[in-house]
Structure formats: structure tokens, C-alpha cells
Amino acid sequence: LQKVGFYDPIKNQTCLNVPAILYFLEKGAQPTRTVYDILRKAEFFKVKIKKEL
């Protein structure tokens, strides 16, 4: 197991290890709905799309 980030709802703080997340998603990992929502709120998918262009 590898830590790829955390979310603190009390402080409304998110920390993401973007290279690790990209690696696991490219290998076929499927985020849970909660994780997907956290990634969406952090605009992770906008960053991913820019990197693909």
C-alpha cells in the first residue's frame, strides 16, 4: 500500500501525491466515489487533461 494523499474535513485541507495517483490510475485503479469527488474538487482531472495535451 502507498499513501497518495489525505483530506482533513475539519481544516478543509487536501494534500495529493499527483504522480502516485496518476501512476495508479494508469495501471487501472478505480477511485471510490468519495475519492473521485475529492479529486474533482481539487481540479485533479483538469491537470490530468492538460498533461495529456
Image: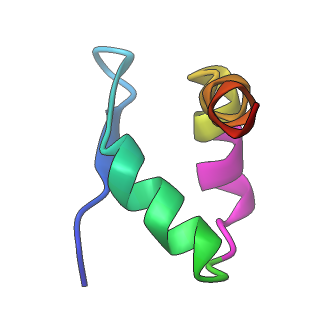
Q: Is residue 7 above or below residue 46?
A: below
Predominant secondary structure in magenta? helix
Residue at position x 71%, y 34% in the image: 45
Q: Is residue 6 above or below residue 21?
A: above
In magenta, the rendered stretch is 30-37
Residue at position x 30%, y 48% in the image: 5
Total marks shown come to 0
Left or right: 19 in relation to 38? left
Residue at position x 67%, y 82% in the image: 28
Which of the 4 image quadrants contains residue 52? Answer: top right
Left or right: 49 in relation to 26? right
Q: Is residue 35 magenta?
A: yes
Q: Position of residue 17 (x, y in %)?
A: 30, 45
Question: Which is more toward the observer, 7 or 16?
Answer: 16
Residue at position x 32%, y 21% in the image: 10
Question: Which is more toward the observer, 7 or 50?
Answer: 50
Task: Point out the residue furthest to the left here.
Answer: 2
Q: Position of residue 3 (x, y in %)?
A: 23, 64
